[in-house]
Amino acid sequence: MEDVRVAAAQTCTLVGKTGENIEKTLRIARQARERGVEILCFPELHIPGYWRHRDLYLLAEPVPGWISDEMVRIARETNLTILAGMAELGSNGAVYNTQIVATPQGLAGKYVDAQRKCPPLTAQ
């Protein structure tokens, strides 16, 4: 069996600064790749910044969409598999705390349906 190096990134991202948070993700991914990491995991709501507020929908984006496209771009540039948390705007208009999986080959998936977490403002 082949060894795989996995890293968990403990980060502090700024609420509502999605573009800056994506650039921070790229910097961390580059550092991880230099250290031989193959799978890099970021925390929930990493991309929009962790915000438990009724206005989280303002930061939510559909999947696939521009945020998942940016994560795939970073995965391709660094040759990593990246798991990153975001606020997903579902087709039903609800906002979900979703973890996406981006690989150099494209968007590999997201946690959905039974695995999707409850909307961030409901009891879990």
Image (tube, rainbow, N blue to C red):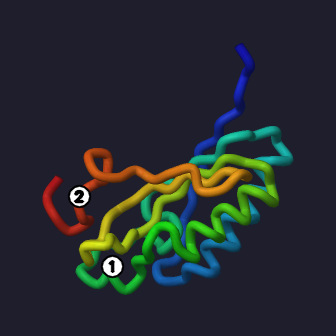
Tell me which corner region of the image, top left, top right, bottom left or bottom right, holds residue 96: bottom left
The image quarter containing residue 74 is bottom right
Question: Residue visible at 44% across and 77% down?
Answer: 61
Tell me the element at label 2. loop
Name the residue: 65% across, 36% down: 6
**Residue at position x 67%, y 61% in the image:** 72
How many marks the image carries: the answer is: 2
Looking at the image, which is closer to me, 69 or 34?
69
Left or right: residue 77 versus residue 3 is: right
User: Does residue 119 lie above or below 34 as drawn?
Assistant: below
Which residue is the site of mark 1? 56
Furthest-right residue in view? 34
Question: Badge 1: few (under 14), some or many (20 or more) residues near its Cα, within 10 Å?
Answer: many
Image quadrant where one finds the N terminus:
top right
Residue 116, x across and y down, in percent: 31, 52
Q: Could you tell me the amino acid type at mark 2?
A: Cys
**For this rendering, which residue is in front, 106 or 117?**
106
- Left or right: 101, with 35 as reference point: left
At x 67% / y 51%, what residue is drawn?
103
Across and down, in percent, residue 110 comes to 45, 53
- The residue under label 2 is 118
Asked whether, in this view, residue 116 is left or right of residue 74, the answer is: left
Outermost residue toward the top in this view = 1
> Mark on residue 109?
none
At label 2, counting other C-alpha atoms closer than 10 Å, the crowd grade (few under 14, some 14-19, many 20 or more) is some
| Left-right relation of 90 to 49 | left
**Marked residue nearer the N-terminal end (1 or 2):** 1
x and y, in percent, of residue 25 in the image: 66, 64
Q: Is residue 24 above or below residue 34?
A: below
Report x, y in % for residue 117. 28, 54
Q: Secondary structure at mark 1?
A: helix
Q: Label 1 sits on what residue type? A: Leu
